[in-house]
Image: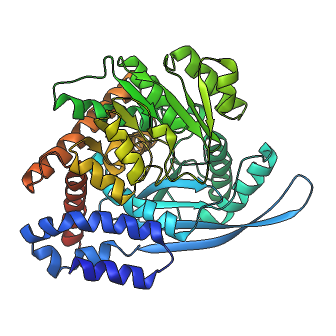
Amino acid sequence: MLNDIYRSVVEKDPNQPEFHQAVQEVLESLEVVLDKHPELRRMKIVERLVEPERVIMFRIPWTTDDGEIMVNRGFRIEFNSAIGPYKGGLRFHPSVNLGILKFLGFEQIFKNALTGVPMGGGKGGSDFDPKGKSDLEVMRFCQSLMNELFRHIGPYTDIPAGDIGVGGREIGFMFGQYKKLRNEWSGVLTGKGLEYGGSLIRPQATGYGSVYFGEEMLKTRGKSYQGLTCLVSGSGNVAQYTTEKINQLGGKVVTLSDSSGYIYDEEGITDEKLAFIMNLKNVRRGRISEYADKYPKAVYTAVDPDLDYNPLWNHKADCAFPSATQNEINGKDAQNLVNNGVFLVSEGANMPTTPDGVEIFLEKRLLYGPGKAANAGGVATSGLEMAQNAAFTCWSKEEVDKKLHQIMINIHRQAYDAAEKYGKPGNYVLGANAAGFMKVANAMIAQGVV
């Protein structure tokens, strides 16, 4: 039956491979769950889950500093609102299309359910590339996008956040335009600046959360990060704060990357070196290769598009934290990680491992935290930002971090317990899918056929 559902998804939308991959990964976990809960088959829960409740697509005209008129495409996928308003990021990147956003929105359903915060699943964005654009060009684009998006979002309907290409600058421009159009101040966007309703720890949350999840997995084997060597991909928000938290917990990060290549620093990326990277990426918007110019003992390797593996994942290490983008670890990379001694993988990015890579991790019984569980800290803290906005209050850094840490502990417990319940102990993929699915499915049954 689940194979029939998958075939139907592919037939309806044949040119959306990322969405197909996300659906297949979840469906492979659900057969054992549906066998225990036959009422979910009768209610066609899975068939309803794979169809978004609403798909919004619109044009975004804007002008460059030279006066040239540009047109981009905007999207918002409102996937499922059974347990709360739609919640999920906005991504600005040339690769953005309907299939990628549907994959991200579908994953968001289960991720949000695991947090314990009442949030449904959604995602959106545009094929606009903010790289190389002036602040004024980004502002004009964001305002044009919000001229349409404001009709479809709200603090009790759909609360977008940031994602790749959307940071504090972009959130600020969109929030200002929403406020002007609606003539109201509300927590309609998360990831806001602290001066106007943002939450402490929000920038750190996804990276911190993936490390906290990994820490819980380590505890099941009586281990900690002390003295462990870690590979981290990416050099944006998630990778930066993953590195920061690993350093705080006694581990050593030796790699970071961007689209041009990666650096390997055998001595470790210390807090001082991390501060250089944060300035390089967040302020100067430079390339990771500059790290090797600053620290000559580090080695920079340029990306070779013809390679069928990523050399970043081919270094001796104990832990890996893919924190860049989807499908950055393939089967060959996964085998290289295993061969080089890696026994823990905690995903900071969304679906960064291909199905053949996941299969290797599960077969070798690695401590493998899939993105929908391991990187849920970002959206969890977005939920905490929503709570602070609703109460017109602001919590301390320590209070937010404590709540985030507890949420990640709870997510680990849910995934761990569900894996055991359904006969696959230690399989966090099945555990996370089953736990998130059951929460959403029970809410859908309670609300009838809508």
Q: Quadrant of the N terminus?
A: bottom left
Vertical comparison of 281 with 333: above or below: above
195 left or right of 48 in image: right
Which one is nearer the viewer's eye here, 436 or 382? 436
Residue at 49 percent of width and 73 percent of height = 16
Relative height, residue 184 to residue 382 (above, below): below
Q: Residue at x 13, y 70 (%)?
A: 34
The foreground one among 260 and 395 is: 260
- Is 222 on the left or on the right of 311, as rendered? left
Residue 55 position, x and y percent, is: 50, 73
> Picture quarter containing residue 430?
bottom left
Q: Is residue 435 left or right of residue 95?
A: left
Q: Which residue corresponds to the image point at 67% horizontal and 31% vertical from the top-left? A: 289
Which x, y percent locates residue 184?
59, 51
Residue 203 in view, yes or no: no
Q: Is residue 108 above or below residue 199?
A: below
- Report if residue 218 is visible in the image: yes
Please state the horizontal and vertical placement of residue 398, each as a whole percent of the image.
38, 22
Residue in front for this viewpoint, 50 or 316 = 316
Residue drawn at the location 32% of the way across and 48% of the way down: 370
Tell me where residue 409 sits by quadrant. top left
